Amino acid sequence: MNSSAHPKQNSNSDLAYQKAILGSVSRTFALTIPLLPPAIEVVVGNTYLLCRIVDTIEDAAELSPTEKQGLSKLFLEAVLGAIPVEDFVTPCLDTLKDYSNIDELDLIAHTPTVLRILHTFPDKDQAAISRCVSIMSNGMSHFHGRQTQAGLKDLAEFEQYCYVVAGVVGELLTSIFSNYSIEFAKQIKGHEQLAIAFGQALQMTNILKDSPEDRARGVSWKPASMSQNELLKISYEKLQDSMSYILLIPENEVGMRRFCLLAFGLAVMTLEKITTRKEFSNKSEVKLSRNTVWVFYAFTKIAASNPLLMKAFFYVSSKQLRKLSAKNL
């Protein structure tokens, strides 16, 4: 479907739904996505919802790996236009009838709305989104059967997992930002790896933060052979690359910078908490308070266009991580 000729077909009710459901399924992204310039806010918001549907299938503990793979395949075919969207929605809702998160079920029921919005974007953005959803969906399907209590095989498999669930989102953001800003497209040339590290850093933070809950349901996404400290050290290296990535965004693109800086900063502060605590049995112990989040949100207003302030924040907020990284583990 070539829809670049009609980029304004989004109906108000579709967009209103996208905005509302975003607030219901993700507090963090409902905070960061509206910081983006309006032209790309709707694109990134839509992509997030598509990725969230893939995630919901992944998170459904009551489904077998085969059921998850089947639903992921149907979803991808619906996104790519190979099957009518109802051929995904009906079996998916049927299979997930005991799933507890009603907002996520509502999102699945509204897959046609999300795809209608997707099909109004310029072809370049649609192609980048389809690529991202394909890699994520196929990648997660590959890992569905690998969930064990022991964890992933090694660091390479761990990095691959972090790539298919988040590194690829870093690549997607880079495509969308580049389609929007010629200056950013020039700056990022030759540094595309930083985008992957940015996504992976956020994912590694989530894996470390959620590990007690994962353990309780009998799975681990950590590499079996690595200690928590070794993982924190790798995460810190990815954060350093993430900082370099944000600094490549033109200073006048304050919205794009704030979007990335907010996600980055929350990850830095969470990892620092994990490093300081060493042991924790519930993610609430390392969760940032709402107050911390809002204070940092306000700080990004001033810091986004000031590289020195950004670097100072990173330096001050990663003291324990830096100490740990300096040690020979």
Image (spheres, rainbow, N blue to C red):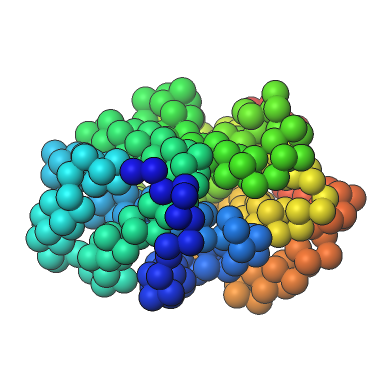
Residue 324 in view here: no
Residue 69: % across, % down: 19, 39
Q: Residue at x 22, y 34 (%)?
A: 145
Residue 242: % across, % down: 68, 41
Residue 106: % across, % down: 27, 69
Q: 214 or 43: which is nearer to us?
A: 43
Q: Give the image quarter of residue 41.
A: bottom right
Is residue 309 shown left or right of residue 282?
right
- Mark count: 0
Residue 80 in view here: yes
Q: Give the image quarter of residue 144.
A: top left
Q: Residue at x 57, y 44 (%)?
A: 176
Residue 132: % across, % down: 43, 39
Q: 65 or 125: which is nearer to us?
A: 125
Quadrant showing the N terminus: top left
Quadrant showing the C terminus: top right
Is residue 168 shown left or right of residue 318?
left
Q: Going by the picture, which residue comes out furthest to the front?
A: 5
Is residue 196 shown left or right of residue 156?
right
Q: 39 or 9: which is nearer to us?
A: 9
Q: Residue at x 60, y 58 (%)?
A: 39
Q: Work out whether 283 lies above or below 13.
A: above
Q: Work out whether 76 lies above or below 152.
A: below
Q: 103 or 182: which is nearer to us?
A: 182
Q: Going by the picture, which residue comes out furthest to the right?
A: 308
Q: Residue at x 43, y 65 (%)?
A: 10
